[in-house]
Image: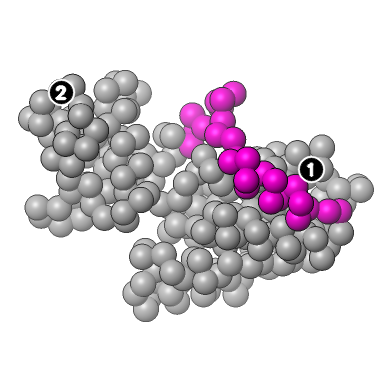
Amino acid sequence: MISERKKRLLEIIIKEYLKTASPVPSGLLVEKYKLDISPATVRNEMMELENEGYIYQPHTSAGRIPTEAAYKLFSTDLENSKKRKNLKESEYQLLEKTFKRDEAAFRQTAKAIAELSGATVFWAFNKNDLYYTGLSNLFSQPEFNQVNAVCDVSAVIDRMEDIIDEIFEDLDYGEQILIGSDNPFGNFLSTVLTKYKNNKLSGIFGILGPLRMDYAHNLALVEFIKHKFE
């Protein structure tokens, strides 16, 4: 457990890193968010967060970056919360208009959600029928702008059908957030997904992206699909 003050700081660091993909300096937190604590206190709290494994400093004189543990802390809160983030009305209306109970419409809905999430979307309509879209979203993320990272992502995409086949039966029904080391698609990625039943056939819908993803928004998008099959 961490204090509420440190948890608030960590939440702000995650929010900033989500937007900028750059290490977050302590000075920025004090100036931008008008925190009612001194810069020295912020630095001390960030040092403690680093010692506790929630943030790290990629190189000397840089700000801090959230770790897998930080994302897991807030994703657990998100999964357990009864006050989850709702879709914008425009997003909801777009998906309502697009969604219909046929495979062609499923694909159009997947494309719309890939655009709204800025991530890759996969949809296993049943165990042996996989569709995915939005790969360019994944490759455009700054985390994957190096050759070796592109190769890692490409290897995951090449194995996606096999990975889904391996996990299909063991996945629980409902929404799940799988981060880093818990993510079967790769420890450098995160997945927000739901497993559902459609006319006695099971399906899996998921959003795949870097650890630096908007989990609250993506969970709301996944929940839209889940509710359509309840």
Q: Residue at x 67, y 44 (%)?
A: 92
Is 22 on the left or on the right of 165, as rendered?
left
The percent position of residue 19, horizontal first and vertical second, equals: 35, 51
Q: CA distance from mark 1 to mark 2?
A: 46 Å
The answer to if 46 sits in the magenta stretch is no
Residue 140 location, x and y as percent? 43, 69
Q: Secondary structure at mark 2?
A: loop
Task: Tell whether 110 sits left or right of 22.
Answer: right
Up/down of 63 relative to 151, above or below: above
Q: Is residue 49 left or right of residue 153?
A: left
- Of residue 211 and residue 83, the one placed in the foreground of this image is 83
Instruction: Identify the image quadrant of residue 84.
Output: top right
Look at label 1 and name its amino acid.
Lys
Q: Pick the residue in front: 160 or 91.
A: 91
What residue is shown with label 1? 228
Instruction: Name the disc covering residue 37, or none.
Output: 2
Q: Is residue 39 visible?
A: yes
What are the residue bounds of the magenta stretch? 75-101
Query: The N terminus appears in which quarter of the rendering?
Result: top left
Quadrant containing the C terminus is top right
Label 2 environment density (alpha carbons within 10 Å; few <14, some 14–19, many ≥20):
few
Q: Residue at x 59, y 35 (%)?
A: 86
- Does residue 185 appear to the left or right of 33 in the view shown? right
Residue at 13% x, 40% y is: 27
